[in-house]
Amino acid sequence: MKKLLPSLLAAAALATFAIAPAQAQGDKPKDKVTLMLNWYLYSEHAPFFLGKEKGFYAEEGIDLDIQEGRGSAVTAQAVAAKSATFGYIDVTTMIKAAAKGAPLKSTGVLFQVSPMSVMGFTEKNIKTPKDIIGKTVAVTPGDSMSQMWPLFLKVNNITADQVKIVSGDGQTKLNAVTNGQADLLLGYVMDQAIKLQDATGKPVTPIRFADSGVNQISSGIITNKNLLTENPDLVKRFMRASTKAAEAAEKSPEAAVDAMLKANPKAGVRDTLIVGMKQSVALYHTKETANQRPYRVAMKNVSDSLDLLVQYGGMDASTRGKPEDYVTLDFLP
């Protein structure tokens, strides 16, 4: 027995050294990461809270701070200035900023089907584009939806004089439909439709632009280009956790909403947030990416969106570039 003791001690020592690296990795300080959203909390933001609650970010060595935003353009500026590590915004807004020199790039597009819609109360029985003829529509001049509106009318063989337009900001549009000054408004299927339903208790029917072939990529993750070379491992870990979070939200929109409400009880009304979350999940894939994991956008979809930006979105054709100039899939799992 005494002769075996040194070998037993050696084996124990080896076991200790074998365990140490794993413990060291677990004890390693987490990277503090700020994710700035595009707006105040609503349905589409819920997956990030679910990912945080389930520990997906912590498992990747990330201490995630989720901050509300005040518009995609403001969040883009924050990420360009490195005051936020990542942004979750309308990717076409980032593209326009990057085309003018902002050091920004998208590392994945979550909303590959545009949420742009024209919507009104279900009781009005406005279900198809042709039903819009003769109706009054509330719009916000200059926003992305008003820029795509003429194309939506054109592809549905509706002339501008067949629809009456009233103008106002976001709240004015909601008020106009609520009080009957307008039949419809231009809005996002998982945002304004939910706000309208929450405010009135009445069901809302959205008519999506994308169903008529007017489709732009929308919400996705952006970061400062410098981070892609300075800390590519962090970007990969963040996108790995975010992909898992989106997949978990696809499986259980209710759990995603509950996680967001647990973190922020004033984020909205649970039932309508769940409706919005389900509508958000329906925007995650085109037919080209139906069998792929979230955020893996088809580059043809990005290219088509660039064409629409040049034609209708005020982008200078000389700065159009290639899809790869603005979106990379290299950091996705």
Image: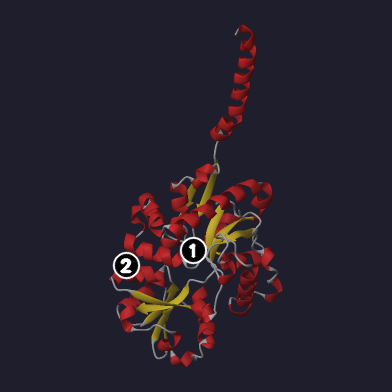
- What's the residue type where badge 1 is placed? Gly
Q: In the orientation shown, which residue stands out farthest toward the top?
A: 2
Residue 221: x and y, percent?
A: 56, 58
The reply, left or right, for residue 35 in relation to residue 225 is left
* Side (left or right) of 238 relative to 125: right
Q: How is the image coloured?
A: secondary structure
Splitting the image into 4 quarters, where does residue 216 fall? Answer: bottom right
Q: Where is residue 19 in the image (x, y as percent from the top left)?
A: 58, 28
The structure residue drawn at horizontal position 33% and vertical position 78%, both measured from the top left corner, is 121
Horizontal side, residue 185 vs residue 295: left or right: left
Residue 273 percent coordinates (x, y): 37, 62
Residue of label 1:
71
* Quadrant assignment, res 60: top right
**Mark 1 vs mark 2, CA separation in Å:** 21 Å
Q: Kindly tell me whether residue 279 is visible in this rendering.
A: yes
Q: Name the amino acid, label 2.
A: Asp
Q: Is residue 167 above or below residue 48?
A: below
Q: Answer above or below: position of 155 versus 290.
A: below
Disc 2: which residue: 198
Q: Could you tell me which secondary element the residue under label 1 belongs to?
A: loop
User: Quick check: marks 1 and 2 in contact, CB under 8 Å?
Assistant: no
User: What is the number of callouts on the image?
Assistant: 2
Write the residue at 41% across / 86% down: 132
| In the foreground, 144 or 126 | 126
How many C-alpha atoms fall within 10 Å of the one at disc 1: few (<14), some, or many (≥20)?
some
With respect to residue 274, does 184 lie above or below?
below
Q: Residue shown at 59%/60% (left/top)? A: 108
The answer to whether one can see residue 85 in this image is no
